[in-house]
Amino acid sequence: MSATLPARVIALASPITDMENLDIRLRADASSRQVALRAIAFSVVWLLVGSAFGLIASFKLHMPDWLVSNPMLTFGRIRSAHLNAMAYGWASSAMLGVSVWIIPRLVHTELRVPKAAEAGLYFWNIGMVLGIVGILAGYSDGLEWLEMPRYWADPFFVIGGGLVGLSLLSTIAVREVEHLYVSVWYIMAAFIWFPIIFVVGNWPTYSGVESAAVNWFYAHNALGLWLTPVCLAAAYYFIPKILGRPIYSYQLSLLGFWTLGFFYSLNGMHHLIGGPLPTWMITTSVVASGLMIIPVMAVGVNQHMTLNKRFGALRYSPTLRFIVFGSVAYTLVSLQGVFMAFREVNRLTHFTHVTVAHAHVGLYSFVTMIMFGSIYYILPRLLGREWVSEKLISWHFWAVGIGQTVYLVPLTVAGMFQGVAMADPTSTWETVVRAMLPGLIGRSIGGTLLTIGHCVFAWHVFLMFRGGKQKQGLPPFHEVAPIVTKRDKASFVAGGVK
Amino acid sequence: MLPSSLTVTLATTILGLLTVAVFFLAWRRGQFNRINQQALLPLDDDDMNVARPWETASQRAERVEEFGPPARRTTPGIWGGAQ
Amino acid sequence: MTRIWLLLTGVLAIIIFATSLLVVIPNTMIGQVKIPSQLSDYTALQARGREVYVSEGCVYCHSQQVRDPVYTSDKERGWGPRATVPSDYVYDKPHQLGTMRTGPDLINIGVRQPSDQWHHVHLFNPRSLMAWSIMPAFPYLYTVRDSASIKPGEVFYSVPGGKLPAGKVIVPTADGDALVAYLKSLRRTYPVPTGDEPAARSIGGRSEHTMP
């Protein structure tokens, strides 16, 4: 039954006290191993591809005569290739992997119809390739977040996501625990929400203002009802798992789930504030955006209280470090989003780079960091070997940590100056452009750092997959123990178990 | 061209109440019972009785009190027993 | 099992709720927007130009909407005489309202810049007209030719600002021509069509719009 797990995992895990729990965990991991590993491998490839697109797009904004002779490399195409490669290629592939790995563990049984999940993963990635090629070749659908050609790329996402969802739901249906842990709720809901909003968003009949309304209904929910729930599910799994203590308030976590589902889906129209839409639609969205404070605070307070007085753990576990970074970013980005949805703020920040920076706090500081953390936890357990180098993990963390700061701070500040300049009708457009330029250059520097971090991470993942000699005497990572990055291992070991 | 505000308000209320109703139904069917035990679902026994290096003495004592004496692992390579 | 279905129902209820509120209701409402008499559908050339606009991703830097003059400076900036309304967009599929203004709004660019020459030279290299511009150049929408090779009746443009060697001129490709035709068609300056006044679109009669 655990035949597909490397012998090393079993050998390392076997001395642990509770054989029954262990056996369940091993069976669960063995059943999801192949799909999860491939999903992670695909996602890392998309991370590199998306970084390259993002970097090119960023440099083009302050070097407008660079790479202009080929239509495939024009800013408008590279920019949407970047967004799609990151949101659907990197983040979503990684999420598929994390989901198929977490669900069997949480419902105490093997992943059912893993072949369907695997086929779903392939469909998804075929859709990605077709979509990116379509965008670069100029066949964009022209709607933000929905650029991939709706007839020859998008069906792959519906089928792919549906097949993975089918496998997950079949697994949950035969679960061997009575209750559904909050992470299970989030993941289940995400896999049901996604195909629905994706089909609604891509439906080809809308035109005019309605097309805009549906566009932003989808685009905002892609973050809120697809990326966010799976990432919160991961956070709700890994934080208690690594700390070895349950979540501070389980009620609060359920409240967060339901209110997220209830309010988030109404938020999208705040992207069109001031635009030619019925006032009531936008007002509804602004109100719903305000109500988002409830699920956000539920998650934020809960995770903070779980971690409270144990912040030392961040020095020990890279998984926890990335996940907590992501969770804090979730709270911050959501509060920022609530704030930006208010008309008086929006009149300055709308149409500026503040929005771009905000989107990156969500998709990078929250989603991407949580996925990095999850992969740091999952990969050693499925491959049966420790991460090769503490240094690489550390470089990765600091490169992306500093990179984000260098990316986000100048871009946000420049976006505010841009907004102020735009609001003043006497300032020329040259003034507006000059106001945003320092932020655009800062973003390129930050983006370069992020890309360096991604290359380090991808190299490390490659070393993991390649295998080879294992260093001896490293603190282990299988099962309970967090991966240790703290230098002073002697004191760690001594302080470990008494 | 516009529906009256009453129609919109009614539609919102009815659909919103439906969601709330499903939520309470799930509650009544027991999905929200024994909440504190549910919170333990991701944790296995061996997650609980291993002390963490960042924990203070009192946090460790708390752990022992709640989950029993810490597991002792001696196999090389196993966390807490590395050479 | 029962609980699984309960959860599924709850999830579906949420999604149906949101979909109906934000998609279906507006569909019945603004799906029936009357076509303004002053607005005509795009010609074949303009429609092709719109496809170029979409595939080159112009929307990522240029919006196509004039917001309420009460709380934005869009009107004072000269982007349009009034806030745009739903019926201004009846022929737009997909919409290109946009969410970013790295460059100026374009919904009335056909009014502000009616000249073919300006558009072509600007698209070929924006820095030939404005040194500080960060808009990408689109040289692939043009062929660069010797001015001696231009036959009578052929349309060509010379590019200022030292962006082309002496004796060279640009001739728009079919896509370049179409794009400029589309840009010049962007004008929403007629009065707000009856029944589409901002006040008519808000609930309870209160509106922040004050435009006629």
Image: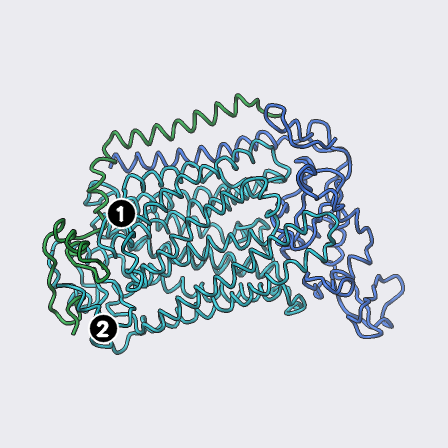
Chain colours: A cyan, B green, C blue
The residue positioned 27% from the left and 65% from the top of the image is A483
In the picture as drawn, the residue positioned furthest to the right comes out as C152
Report the amino acid beneath label 2: Leu
Q: Please give the name of the residue rendered at 35% of the width and 56% of the height, measured from the top-left corner.
A: A324
The crowd level at tag 1 (other Cα within 10 Å; few <14, some 14-19, many 20+) is many
Q: Image point 59% across, 61% down: which residue?
A: A439
Tell me if residue C47 comes above or below residue A454 in the rendering.
Answer: above
Q: Position of residue C200 (x, y in %)?
A: 65, 26
Question: Disc 2 vs disc 1: Cβ atoms closer than 8 Å?
Answer: no
Residue A140, located in which quarter of the rendered image? bottom right
- Pick whichever, A417 or C86, lies toward us: A417
Disc 1: which chain?
A
Residue at (54% x, 30% y) in the render:
C25
Q: Is residue B21 above or below residue A199?
A: above
Q: Which mark is residue A219?
A: none
Residue at mark 2: A474
Measured as percent of width and height from the top left, residue C19 is found at: 48, 35
Name which residue type carries label 1.
Answer: Ile
Q: Secondary structure at mark 1?
A: loop
List the residue tagged with mark 1.
Answer: A247
Q: Chain of mark 2?
A: A
Q: Position of residue B24 (x, y in %)?
A: 31, 29
